[in-house]
Amino acid sequence: MTYFFFLIGPAGCGKSTIAQKIKKKLKIKFFEGDSFHSLKNLDKMKKGNKLKFRDRLPWLININKKLKEYNQSNKEYIIACSALKKSYRNILKRDLKYVFFIYLKCKKKELIKRNLNRNHFFPVTLVDDQITNFENSKELIVINAEKNIIDVQKLVLEKIKNIIKAK
């Protein structure tokens, strides 16, 4: 079976950091969702402009298309991707069988602090918009990501291992 584990949430929740650590720990392939954005989208965000659905749609489709290439590999993959809305998650998982969304949940104050303290293209001015637009849904595996990075990594790793064992 092929498993796709998405680490999702607003900017600064730890998606990429945790995914990189899990990648090394489990020796699995990692996809950075930001690398699928067009230069136009990246430039728009750098300037502090919100992305609209028409901006995001090709990005979501490109991620899904790439993952489909691995659909029959019988391996595990970890993807860092905001996946803010349920409709976005539906596009991301289209035609993929074992897809799990792990939501790294943080309070607004923590997200803003983290975004101010990192070297990233994403401006802190857009964090509030991501928080406002995030949609909870039943399929999410929720992890409190306000703990230290080692503890969050352990929780995510445990969830992933349990899912793989259960199938």
Image (cartoon, helix red, strand yellow):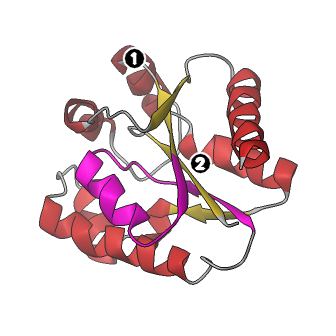
Question: Based on the displayed image, in which of its 4 quarters is residue 145 positioned?
Answer: top right
Q: In which quarter of the image is the N terminus?
A: bottom right
Q: Which mark is residue 20?
A: none
Name the residue rendered at 74%, 71% in the picture.
Answer: 74
Q: In this view, does 96 lie above or below 150?
A: below
Name the residue rendered at 33%, 71% in the picture.
Answer: 59
Where residue 147 sits in the image (x, y, percent)?
Answer: 63, 16
Looking at the picture, which amino acid does disc 1 mark? Lys
Q: Is residue 50 above or below residue 44?
A: above
Question: Reading the chain from its start, which is encountered first: label 2 or label 1?
Answer: 2
34 vs 3, nearest the viewer: 3
Q: Does the magenta stretch include residue 123?
A: no
Where residue 2 sits in the image (x, y, percent)?
Answer: 67, 66
71 vs 79, nearest the viewer: 71
Where residue 96 sits in the image (x, y, percent)?
Answer: 49, 68
Looking at the picture, which amino acid does disc 2 mark? Ser
Name the residue rendered at 27%, 38% in the picture.
Answer: 130
SS for callout 1:
loop
Q: Is residue 48 left or right of residue 29?
A: left
According to the picture, the residue beneath numbered tag 2 turns out to be 16
Residue at mark 2 to residue at mark 1: CA–CA distance: 18 Å
Magenta segment boundaries in residue numbering: 75-100
According to the picture, the residue beneath numbered tag 1 turns out to be 107
Q: Is residue 151 above or below residue 85?
A: above
Q: In this view, does 99 lie to the left or right of 21?
A: left
The answer, for residue 100, to whether it is visible in the render is yes
Name the residue rendered at 66%, 48% in the picture.
Answer: 19
Crowd around label 2: few <14 · some 14–19 · many ≥20 (10 Å): many
